[in-house]
Amino acid sequence: MQEFEPATDQLDEAWDAIQHVADLQDAWAAINPQGEQQRLDDQLDRNLVQDSDDEFAEMEVPELQSRQNIHQGDQPRCAIETCDPEITEEQAQHMMRQLNEKQRQVFNHVSKWCDDKARDQSVDPFQMFLTGGAGTGKSHVIKCIQYYAKKVFARMTESAEDMTVLSLAHLGTAAFNICGQTICSGLKINPKSQKEYKPLGEESLNTLRVKYRHLQLVIIDEISMVSTTQLTYIFGRLQQIKGTYTDFGNVSILAVGDFYQLPPISPPTPLCFPHDEILKDIWNPLFQIVELKEIMRQKDDAIFAQMLNRLRERKKKQPLQKTDKELLESRRVEENNLTAPPDALHLFYLNKDVDSHNERKLASLNTEMFTIKANDVDQRGGRIIQVHETPHRTTRADDTSLASYLKLAVDARVMLIANVDVSDGLCNGVPGIVKGIEFCNSQNMPIVVYVKFDSDRVGAKTRTTQFIPPHYAGCVPIKPRKESFKVRGRTFTTTREQMPLKLAWAVTVHKVQGQTTDQAVISMKGLRKSMAYVALSRVTHLEGMYLMDYDESRIFCNEDIEANVAKMPTCDLSKANPLTEIDHNTNFVIAHHNIQSLHRHIDDLKRTQK
């Protein structure tokens, strides 16, 4: 020891002294900024599991959950509208024939650009903002555009694996809805990125350049939850990847969402608002708006649909229409002796109300309950400082979603709280039911929890690559996960091992955006602007809506949305279809030399007469 470590005691004293005067990572970054940036990029590759939806510190918001009756034969009470990754041409044409007039105009506009781009690489890109209230079919338009764009751009690539269309979303569940990726994983953007854009390291950049060398179109869903910082990084990443300073690297952007729904987390300012804190306002000068107004989701309940449209834009002091007031009050649980189904999805504003409901449901199960304690290990400079018998008490501000203590039982409703594998649907927020909990030597931490997810698509790949006992057929094995974080107020790093699950009979309004449900019990206590509309519009029909703590003053929007959206330029869709400019009072002839398959598309031609 004296020969190889002659100054061990002095080094330990110096190390302890450094901890009190400096942040070692910041010091290393100052000495070797390029090396530190590459280290961060590599860390991001290994551990892109946290979406920034975990930063609702002041709101105490839990994760996304959908509800399904656990009895065999019942249908899911809450469903994620997922896009089939591989659809046939016949299925795609059926989807396109379902487009209403406005949706078809949007599709024609984008498809014409795809055709022009495939013929001429010099065609200018577009930046479109497709908006509309909940249920207006925005996701349906995305599916049609995805299919057509990939089909057209396939001619330009050398391999079928080359990516030409990239679909992104802020949350893992929203990304899964459109068969895409989270913004963080798709473009290697750290969820904790600062406002000032930091370029990607060369090694990671080369990987993305190869992957996206034929990229032509980026679709960003749930754009209302994207912050100015994220959009700045998307802008910069695409410029880096394509090696050009043109807007978004000369890649077209289709942004889809509704600013009347939930805003970004930090800062909570929608993209359509002026942003003085950034050098360049990317949104306002570039994006052109198209609004869908015909509601498709509640098309069998026209009165309910019309009410939702009015509530979407209702001002805070604006009185409710008499008919809307009567409809809402008719669904009050307290006043009308309504009894909500016991397994209906419950929506709350605060995390404590969600936890209270979940604990009551857990206690009602007739199965053994387990309390799983997290394994916490403190580390400094790669060295283990302390292995804790009792885990740290953590909050959302401590930058970890893994719980100190987790209560589980067979038949418990749970959801994933980490992006284990977004491409396989194992993303932050997908719901399911615990079917088995297996331990090994330790009775504290299970080696695996078998979860039957509501969607068969979730974990489909995992089920084929891992052994699953016959009595757990259809389930997905969820194993303990490790995350590193800093406990608030401390300088060292803690690594926590815990099951990436959370009880989820109830959810918050924040995390139900992007889903639909047949039945929901909605508590209006504490709801802020836009939240009531988001909650109410998740239900597909009036009879499935149950209101608790009813307070009509909680139903209001952000009044500045309308004025700021009105400032956006409108996208001209008329040029996409020349037939729309023809005077239909006169006769005209369509001549085409290739009519072999005309009989198959005569219905499509008739639909363009409008």
Image (cartoon, helix red, strand yellow):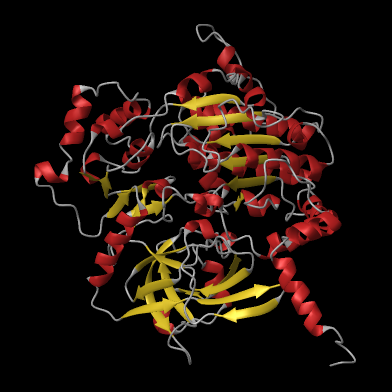
Q: Give above or below for 564 relative to 56.
A: above
In the displayed structure image, the side of residue 553 where residue 163 appears, left or right: right
Residue 3 in the image, given as x and y percentages of width and height: 90, 92
In the displayed structure image, the side of residue 87 where residue 80 appears, left or right: left
Q: Quadrant of residue 313?
A: top left
Outermost residue on the right side: it is 3
Residue 420 in the image, given as x and y percentages of width and height: 56, 65
Residue visible at 38% across and 34% down in the picture: 529
> How many marks overall?
0
- The image quadrant where one finds the N terminus is bottom right
Nearer-the-camera pick, 350 or 31: 31
Q: Give above or below for 463 relative to 315.
A: below
Nearer-the-camera pick, 262 or 269: 269
In the displayed structure image, the side of residue 340 where residue 26 appears, left or right: right
Residue visible at 25% across and 60% down in the picture: 343
Residue visible at 17% across and 35% down in the picture: 329
Q: Quadrant of residue 553?
A: top left
Nearer-the-camera pick, 69 or 41: 41
Q: Give above or below for 63 relative to 133.
A: below
Residue 306 in the image, given as x and y percentages of width and height: 30, 27
In the displayed structure image, the side of residue 89 where residue 594 appears, left or right: right
Q: Evaluate whether residue 59 shows in this view.
A: yes
Residue 84 in the image, given as x and y percentages of width and height: 52, 53
Q: Give above or below for 393 relative to 608.
A: below
Q: Evaluate whether residue 68 shows in this view.
A: no
Residue visible at 57% across and 58% down in the picture: 50
